[in-house]
Each structure stands twice: as C-alpha cells, then as structure tokens.
Amino acid sequence: MNILAAKKRTLEGKISGEDKKLRRAEDGEVRRAEDKRMRRAEDEKSRSLEGERVRGLEMRPGGEEQKIKNKRIRHFRDLMVYQRAFAAAMRIYEITKSFPPEEKYSLVDQIRRSSRSVCSNLAEAWRKRKYSAMFRNKITDSMMESSETQCWLEFAFSCGYLNRSVFSDMDKEYEEIIAMLNSIELNAKKFCF
C-alpha cells in the first residue's frame, strides 16, 4: 500500500510540476503581453502630450508666452522663431546677391551659412526634445549662429556692402531671434517631453 501511495504522490508531483511549468509559461506570456500593452499606451500618451505641452505656446523676446489661437505646434516649421529665422536667412540671401564677386567665397559664403544654420539647429533641436540637455544644446547652437550672423552683417556694413538702415533692421531682427531662442532655452521643459 505504501508503494501505491508513493507512486500516486510521485505521479501527482509530476503532474503538478508540469502544471506549474505551464502556469509559469502562461504567466510569463501574460506579463509580457501586459508589459507590451503598457509600453504602447505610454508611447501613445507621450505622443499626444508632445503636442499638448507646446500647444499654443510660443516664446516672445523677454520670455513671455504668446498664445496661438488653437494651433497645435507639431513641427519645427510651426515655431514663430523658426519662421522669422528662415525669413531673415532668405533676406540675407537676397541682400548678398549684390555683394562684389571677390566676396563670393568669403563673406557671402559665411553669412549665408551662419544664417541658415540658425534654422537647421532649430530643426535638430525640435527632434531632440526627448532629451532636455540635447534640446537646450541645439538651441544654444542656434543662438551662437545668430550671433555669428550678426558679426558677418557688421563686417558687411563696415565694408560698405550694406547701408545703415538694412544693417540696423537685420541686426535688430537677429537680436529678437536670439531673445526668442533664449526664452525657449530657459523654458525647455515646456517644449520637451
């Protein structure tokens, strides 16, 4: 009788051991599926928050926020600072067409590159919003390029390629762009997710 009871317990142990393995496997699959579902939900939530955090916000010089009527900022091209920097770069392109040919590969090339870099660094910053430090770094690079553009504008003015009113207008525009970029950098958390 003891032998039969022992065999029965052994058989039950094997069955329960197999059951345990099956249960563990099922539990693991359930946990993995649940984790996957949670990650997917978090991704969707962060994507929706991405637009919400910057929805209707744009920085003015001096750090004050400007409300944009029900416009969700989804792309770097929606940023007012990008639009202004792009317009300024295009104006510089038009202005430098009249510079003398000997400046083609020096002053013209440098001023066009730096003015365009303001926009390209903004675009890169927008795609790095997930990492606040990288976002702020690119915004800082954009400010540096704006300052470099101001320097080249001053050289062009000193060389007589620009009149005072054009120089003053462009210099003022880049000062405002720098102020907007500085406000974005100081309020990076509103743009990052």
Image (cartoon, helix red, strand yellow):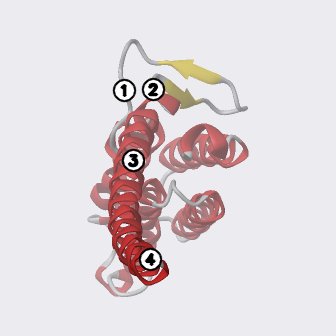
Q: Which residue is denoted by mark 4 in the rendering?
A: 1
Q: Which mark is residue 62?
A: none
- Disc 1 is placed on an element classified as loop
Distance from disc 4 to disc 3, alpha carbons, whole Å, reads 62 Å
Distance from disc 2 to disc 3, alpha carbons, whole Å, reads 18 Å
Whether residue 193 can be seen here: yes
Label 2 crowd (10 A; few <14 / some 14-19 / many >=20): some
Query: Of circles 4 and 3, which is in front?
Result: 4
Q: Which residue is denoted by mark 1 in the rendering?
A: 72
Q: Which part of the image, by quadrant, shows the N terminus?
A: bottom left
Q: Position of residue 164 (x, y in %)?
A: 56, 48
Query: Of circles 2 and 4, which is in front?
Result: 4
- Kindly indicate whether the residue at mark 3 contacts the one at mark 2 (C-beta within 8 angstroms): no
Q: Position of residue 53 (x, y in %)?
A: 52, 32
Label 4 crowd (10 A; few <14 / some 14-19 / many >=20): few
Q: Earlier in the sequence, mark 1 or mark 3?
A: 3
Label 3 crowd (10 A; few <14 / some 14-19 / many >=20): few
Query: Of circles 1 and 3, which is in front?
Result: 3
Q: Which residue is denoted by mark 2 in the rendering?
A: 55
